Each structure stands twice: as C-alpha cells, then as structure tokens.
Image (tube, rainbow, N blue to C red):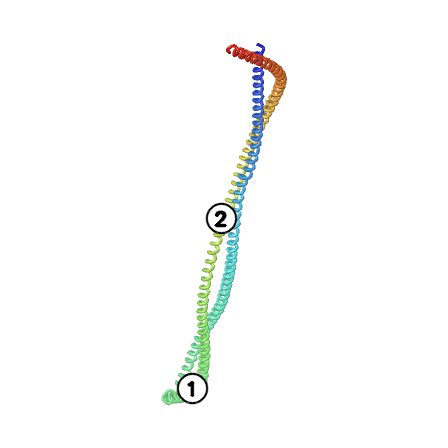
Amino acid sequence: MSSSLSEDEFHRMQLQLIDLRTTNYELDGKCKKLERETIALNEKNENIDRQLQNANKAIQKSKKAKEVEVLLQESDNLQRKLLSQEDDFRLQNQTLMQELTALVATNEVLEKELKEVQSARDTVVNTQNTDNTELEDEIRRLQAQNTVLQKNLTACQDKFEKLHDQLNKTESSTTGDNETIESGQLEEENGAEPSPRALKVEDEVQVSSEEHGHEINVLKLQLDTLLEEKRMLREKLTTIENENKVKVDHLQEELDKTSEKLKKKQESFIHLQEEKENLFKETNQKLEESQSSRDRDKIYYTDQINKLQQEVQRSKQSLEERNESSDQNVKHLQSKLQTLQQQIDASDIVNSQKVKECSTKYEQQLEELRNNNLKLLLEKGDLVTQLQVCLM
C-alpha cells in the first residue's frame, strides 16, 4: 500500500515537474516571442523611421529637385530664348537704327540738295525776275523812248511838211512875178540851183530825218536785241525750270520712297517691340505660374510631410505604448517566471528529497525482494533436488 502510494506520488511529482517545465518552456517561449515582437516592432519602427526619412529625402530630392530642375530648366530655356530674342531684337534694332540713320542721312542729303535746288531755283528765279524786271523796265524805257521818238518823228514830219509848204509858197511867189517867161524860168529853175533858204531847210530836214532815222534804227536794233535776249532768257528759264522740276520730282520720289521705307521700318520696329512686350508678358506669366505651382506643390508636400510626421509620431506613441505594455508583460512574466523558478527549485529540492527517500525505500524493497528471490530460488533448488531425489 505504501509502495503504491509512493509510486503515485512519484508519478504526480513527475507530472508536476513536467507541467512546471512545460509552463516554464511556454513562459520562455512567450518571453522570447514578446522579445521577438519587441525587436520586430523596434525594427519596424526603425524601418518606418528610415522609410520616412527616405520618403522625406526622396520627396525633397526627387520631386522638389525634379520640379525645381524642371522649373530651372524651363527658366533657363526661357532666359536663353529671351536672351536670343533680345540679341536678335538688338541686332534688328541696330540694323534698323543703322538703316534709319542711313535713311535719315540720305533724307538730310536729299533735303539739302532739294533746298539747294530750291535756293538755286529761287536765286535763278529771283535773278530771272530781276533780269525780267530790268528787261521790262528797259523795254518800257525803250518803248517810251520809241513813243517819244515817234512823236518827234511825227513832229519832224509835220515840220518838214510845213517847211515844204513854205518852200512851195516861196517858189510860187518867185515864179508869179515873171509869168511871161515861164518856160525860160522853168528851164532856169530846172537847171539852176535852189535858193539858200530852201537848201538850208532841205538840209535841216534831211539831217533831222537822217538823225531820226539813225536813232530809230539804233533804237529798233536795241529793241530787237533786247527782245531776242529776253526770248533767249525765257527759253533758258523754261529749260532750267524743266530741269529743276525733273530734279525736284526725282528728289520727291526718292523722298517718298525713303519715307515709305522709314514708315515700314518704324512699323516693323513697333511690331518687334510689341512682340518683345508680349514675350516678356508670356515669360513673366509662365514664371508666375511656375512659381504659383511650385508654391502649391510646396504647400502640398509640406502638408504630406506633416501628415507623415503625425503618423510617425502616432506610430511612435503606439510603439512606445506597446513597448511599455510589452515591458510590463515581460516584467510580469519574468517575475512570474522567477516565482515559478523558485517554486520549481523548491519543488525540485522537495521532490529530490522525496525521490531520494523513495529511491532508498525502493532500493531497500528491491534488496528485500532480491533477498526473498534468492531465498525462493534456494528453496526452489532445494525443492527441485528433493523432488529429484524423491523421483529417483
């Protein structure tokens, strides 16, 4: 009875030891599992931190850098385009200014030539006008002289006629005294010389007529020469006027052409200026749009970064809470494990003592059983020998 109870106790103790060891193993496994979870959570937290840092770096480097690079490239392209267009505009402006200066110079030269031609024409016209006025004055003077001479001529003719009449009267008075010897007197008058008075009158009339005729011829010659000179001057004036008119028309045509070219250049200059202003407006608008888009992206990414930081902060807080709870659980399990270990150690000591006692008891019982078995064997051998002896 005592041996069976001891075996039950031994088995129960063994079962308790096995249960304690299994609980110890389970607690060790849970502790290791919690440690692994804490390590995994720490690694996860570190990975999240690294991912957040990498994400921030990637966001800051990739997106911002790319966008900034794109914006910088766009701004550089726009600046290069603007510089090239400014260079083209500068060259065009220089060429236009050179052409304008050349046109202005040619225009000034043409204006000077036109002024010179006009001044020459004015001087020629003035000289011609003065010459014409002088000629007209001279013609008027000659006409006046001609009229005076004609009056003198008529007066001389009247005087000549009067003298001729007086001469006829004197001749008739001289011939009236001697009417009987009319034929002889007529022959004497035809063959004889006239009287001195008649000769004198005739000489005076002849001289005056010759003088007046000479003066008239001289005046007529002068008048004809003046008229011829006037006609030649008029022809020369008309030719000069025609030449000046042709030159003025040519200069006016060139001036119109240069003014048309200047107008076209000014229109092209204004068009280029408008294109430049439009280009400046477009570039400024694009830069403003890029700046506004960059500001919007910056605000968006800052919001995203703040959200990620908040999530990381929440994850850190939850991780810290988990770490604290896991630390508490680990501490609790460690304390429980220590108590269990102490219990196991105490139970091991008690059980070892009991086992030793039981083992000693069992050894004693085994010894007794062995002794009994030997005795029985001896008794059996004796009985066998006795039985053999009996059978024999």
Most foreground residue, 375 or 302 = 375
Give the numbered dot on residue 78.
none
Give the numbered dot on residue 194.
1
User: What amino acid type should be assigned to the residue bearing mark 1?
Assistant: Pro
Give the numbered dot on residue 275.
2
Say if 179 sits above or below 51 in the image. below
Mark earlier in primary sequence (1, 2): 1
Q: Secondary structure at mark 2?
A: helix
**Quarter of the rendering occupied by the N terminus:** top right
Say if 34 sits above or below 283 in the image. above
| Residue drawn 47% across the image and 56% down it | 261
Q: Secondary structure at mark 1?
A: loop
The count of marks equals: 2
How crowded pointer 2 is (Cα within 10 Å; few <14, some 14-19, many 20+) is rated as some
| Residue drawn 54% across the image and 33% down it | 304
Residue 47 visible (yes or no): yes
Residue 151 visible (yes or no): no
Q: Nearer the viewer, mark 1 or mark 2?
A: 2
User: What amino acid type should be assigned to the residue bearing mark 2?
Assistant: Glu
The answer to whether residue 371 is left or right of residue 133 is right
Say if 216 sits above or below 312 in the image. below
